[in-house]
Image (spheres, rainbow, N blue to C red):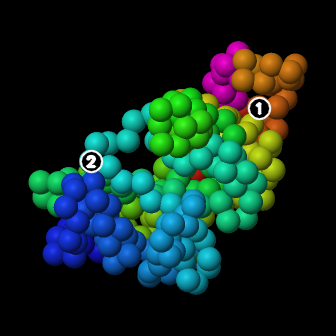
Amino acid sequence: MKLGFEESQTGYSSGSQKAKAWTEAWVRAWAYCPHCGGAKITPFPNNSPLADFFCPTCSEEFELKSQKAKFGTRVVDGAFKTKCERLASQNNPNLFLMNYDLQSLAVVNLFIVPKHFFVRDIIEERKPLAVTARRAGWIGSNILLSQIPESGKIHIVKGGVIRPKDAVLGEWQRTLFLRDQSLESRGWLLDVMKCVEALGKRDFTLDEVYAFEERLAKLYPGNQNVRPKIRQQLQFLRDRGFIEFVSRGNYRLRS
Ligand SMILES: [Zn+2]
């Protein structure tokens, strides 16, 4: 993998068109499939509504968003309705997010949000476009990156450094169990994963996760049994190898 763009490929005049062509050409040349490890991913023909690339080996689909600035708490995405409809479908795309540097014409950061981290709560409805807009009334969406657990942001390139492919594939496999879960049960799991990550350490106790009880109760106002629900998620995460049980009330994050 090389991080630089091939500048000569484009005849576009505007900066953003050039950047789009460069970043897409880069993905075509260098990005591998994080799901099966296949060496190449292939672009869809133009104007595919939601995905940009697919893996010819395992058929995973990918959407690419790239920009100069680092991604903040939200990323602007496509039509809100379509995005919500695709959530439950098999071919909901995984999201590649790339930052590049126009001075050095190179990729600085590239991370991927696996599709199994997409739940309704991370898709925000935008205001309809004004009546004066070309697509008046159209409703777009934002992806709320801040709502996604860190384990759902898998870096292929970080700060201009290419991470080992083995590490990327391992991180991908680590949370694949989420795909077997319904959107509803995934919500609880992701929220408890975020609480565990927010503790910022490898070893943690049940009591430390209970400290998030109030926060979780606010997210699930109808639920009167937040503590049992927390224990249930931890047990599930343990069964799937995401965390391990050390001793009564003591857990460890597995890497
Ligand atoms: Zn693949």
Q: Which residues are magenta?
A: 202-216
Residue 102's spot in the image, x, y percent?
17, 54
Residue 33 or 161: which is nearer the viewer?
33
Give the class, few, some or many, for how many residues have Cα within 10 Å of label 2's Cα (few <14, many ≥20): some
Q: CA distance from mark 2 to mark 1?
A: 39 Å
Residue 210's spot in the image, x, y percent?
70, 23
Quadrant of the rendered image containing residue 165: bottom left
Q: Which residue does the numbered mark 1 point to in the structure image?
A: 230
Q: Is residue 136 above or below residue 78?
A: above
Give the class, few, some or many, for how many residues have Cα within 10 Å of label 1's Cα (few <14, many ≥20): many
Residue 38's spot in the image, x, y percent?
50, 81
Q: Amino acid at mark 2?
A: Lys
Residue in view at x 51 percent, y 74 percent: 44
Disc 2 or 1, which lies upstream in sequence? 2
User: Mark 2–mark 1 contact, CB under 8 Å?
Assistant: no
Q: Which residue does the numbered mark 2 point to in the structure image?
A: 68
